[in-house]
Amino acid sequence: MERNVGGLDRIARGVLGIWLVVVATAAYRNERHELAAIAGIAGLGLLQNAVTCFCGGNYLFGIDTTTDSGGDE
């Protein structure tokens, strides 16, 4: 897999992913299991994108954000 996520996009995905995992945890503790599942899956997906620097959606649409500034390229 070739990298297609970088820079500010990678940072935003990481921050949003962490936030969604926290929302999922809070929702689960409040017995809102459907919201917890949705937020958890979305958050883990975004974290996976940030860690691997690859996004299937970006690949399908031909988007490459590895040339953005603000990352560790």
Image (cartoon, rainbow, N blue to C red):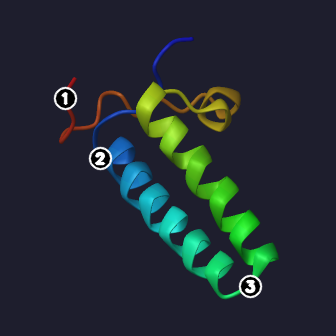
The residue identified by callout 2 is 8
- How packed mark 1 is, by other alpha carbons closer than 10 Å (few <14, some 14-19, many 20 or more), is few
Looking at the rendered structure, which numbered label has been put on residue 52?
none
The residue identified by callout 3 is 31
Mark 1–mark 3 CB contact (< 8 Å): no
* Closer to viewer: mark 1 or mark 3: 3
- How packed mark 2 is, by other alpha carbons closer than 10 Å (few <14, some 14-19, many 20 or more), is some
Closer to the camera, 28 or 59? 28
User: Label 2's element?
Assistant: helix
> Which percent across, then down, holds residue 10?
37, 42
- Residue placed at 53% from the left, 66% from the top? 20
Tell which circle, 1 or 2, labels the residue nearer the N-terminal end. 2
Closer to the camera, 40 or 2? 40
Mark 1–mark 2 CB contact (< 8 Å): no
* Amino acid type of the residue tagged 2 in the rendering: Leu
* Amino acid type of the residue tagged 1 in the rendering: Asp
User: Label 3's element?
Assistant: loop
Looking at the rendered structure, which numbered label has been put on residue 72?
1
- Residue placed at 67% from the left, 76% from the top? 28
* Amino acid type of the residue tagged 3 in the rendering: Glu
Tell which circle, 2 or 3, labels the residue nearer the N-terminal end. 2
Q: Marks 1 and 3, Cα distance to the nearest angstrom?
A: 39 Å
